[in-house]
Image (cartoon, helix red, strand yellow):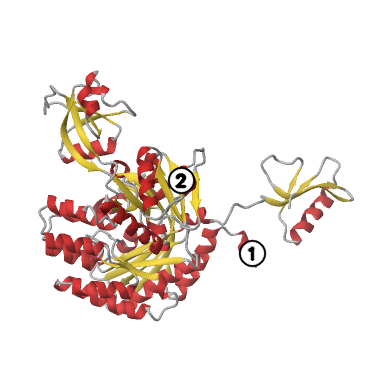
Amino acid sequence: MKQMINVALPKGRLGEKVYSMFEAAGYECPSIREKNRKLIFENEETGIRYFWVKPSDVAIYVERGAADIGVAGKDILEEYHPNVYELLDLKTGVCKMMVAAKSDFHDDHSKTLRVATKFANIARNYYAGKSRDIDIIKLNGSIEIAPILGLSDVIVDIVETGTTLKENDLVVYEDIFPISARLIANKSGFQFKTEEIETLVAALKEQVEQS
Amino acid sequence: MLDESILKREEQAVFALRSLYSGYGYQPYKMSKFEEYDLYARNKDFLVSDSVITFTDTNGKLMALKPDVTLSIIKNYKDEPGCTQRVYYNENVYRVSDETHEYKEILQTGLECMGEIDFYNLCEVLRLAAESLRSLSGDYVLAISHMGFLAGLLKEADADEAFSEKVSGLIADKNAHEIPRLCEEYQVSPELCEKLVKFIGIYGRRDVVLSELEPFCEGETMKAALEELRALSAELDTWKDSEKIRFDFSLVNDMRYYDGLVFQGYVAGIPDVILSGGQYDRLMKRMGRKSGAIGFALYLDLLEAFQSGNRSFDVDVILLYDEDADLTLLKEMAESYQKKGLSVSVQKQKPKKLSCRQLVKFNNKGVEVLETND
């Protein structure tokens, strides 16, 4: 008997893009395109059940086994280090984790660097690797404003096109790592649905290579 | 006679496992809740989490609440040439949870086999691991890996520590797509890079894995590991449920402590690894012992979430009485329910949160049924 695969998709633009890839790979679920407020969609024929969750929660659903697989950005995986398999780079939602600062920023190594970010662990690890003493200012949004108002010296954040930075007279100071959407799987669930998940990964891989 | 249905899942498991292990001559091992902190400080990397709950003892010594059992057992082990010492335990350990970053009490049951470990001992411990999983659920998987392959590959790469650590992490995550980038960063040869990517893809059925590994193995370390797995697989073929025992090299343990076999067990419906074990000869050596050792632990606290549905009622019967009740008759009435095997809570008023199958009111002649919830 074919077992249902539970998939946690990130709500929003990225999730919709990713769903299109699943659809093209043969895992369609037409009801998901209907305009309604449902959160769970399933297609017994293809043996798949999708649900939309907040992007930063996808890894939690997968790690705790509520979803067998899910799609999460590399930023989330690096920040929280969930204990999951990372099976495929979907090569979509591409952007970068970067250090940015005001265009006239001069890095004074004799002082503690004040870093504003949503990604406290990533920032901490990055600067620990450079043995740099930093003061982390954890913010939940509008990070770019921090150096402008003098709240921080630099920011550690995701940069997609750089438009927001440019418009606020900020520049990329250093690259940390590239980001894209990744297919993750629960380690225990994988043991019991190996074949189903492998088939799905192979089909998605084809989509990735085609695009 | 003990009614087993009253036991919680983890309690039932503890009893079943105890009888399983003692059947193989394993001796119970009871230890104190505390251990000198120094033991953990010296072997910090062996611990699953580095945070340990410490306190100062009355004599000024820094003590710790046990985060691990294996180290304490080795500490008390004396080499005895030609023999093996086999013990099992059932203890609470205290660790920081990866998810919540808070201390958690974990009920751990496991066994250790220490001494001159041979093929027979390896098979026995694996058999007990498989039997332990089966006693929890028929739907289980025991994944076995051998540290020799990764060690061999890294030796070939002549890799530095930073690369080894990162590549181990990627292998553990079955993350093949980032291997090329990492290899480029550390200037590792394209041949080895390709090998690592392939290696991540080798897992699953034992016969398939063995044939895929064959052309892969160069160097003594890997060839020896392959031989060991081949012999093991032939033995496993004769076991019950042998298709549930697979090879999976994404299972990586710290090479400073583990060499040889490492294994993990999964039960369908439990999202985490429930059984974890391996051969830790290196740890024994670090702690000054000449013998080898192999063992495993089961995290029984995970079973709590595995209960099939919630219990629908707290008690079978709530027996209500008032001031006029004759207490002797009331007691007899309660006992008559208990004799029928029903649980009964005697109350003056029905507590709000206590659910019951039947709510009855006692009068000195008998009972009047007020509510039935079946």
Query: Pointer 2 and pointer 1: residues touching (CB < 8 Å)?
Result: no
Residue placed under numbered mark 1 in the picture: B3
Please name the residue shown 33% across and 28% down the image: A141
* Picture quadrant of residue B203: bottom left
Q: Residue at x 23, y 70 (%)?
A: B290
Q: Name the foreground residue: B73 vs B175.
A: B175
What is the x, y in percent for residue B168?
23, 57
Decide which of B260, B247 is in the foreground and name it: B247
Q: What kind of element bears circle 1?
A: loop
**Residue B273: where, in percent of width, then height?**
39, 58
Read off the chain for label 2.
A
**Are the residues under badges 2 and 1 in a single subunit?**
no
- In which quarter of the view is residue B200 placed? bottom left
Please state which amino acid type lies under the numbered disc 1: Asp
Q: Quadrant of residue B225?
A: bottom left
Q: Determine if residue B35 is in view.
A: no
Distance Cα–Cα, label 2 vs label 1: 42 Å
Left or right of A205 on screen, residue B156: left
Which label number is shown at residue B55? Answer: none
Which chain is indicated by disc 1?
B
Foreground residue among B341 and B284: B341
Q: Is residue B231 above or below residue B272?
A: below
Q: Nearer the viewer, mark 2 or mark 1?
A: 2
* Residue labelled with disc 2: A51
Type of residue at label 2?
Phe
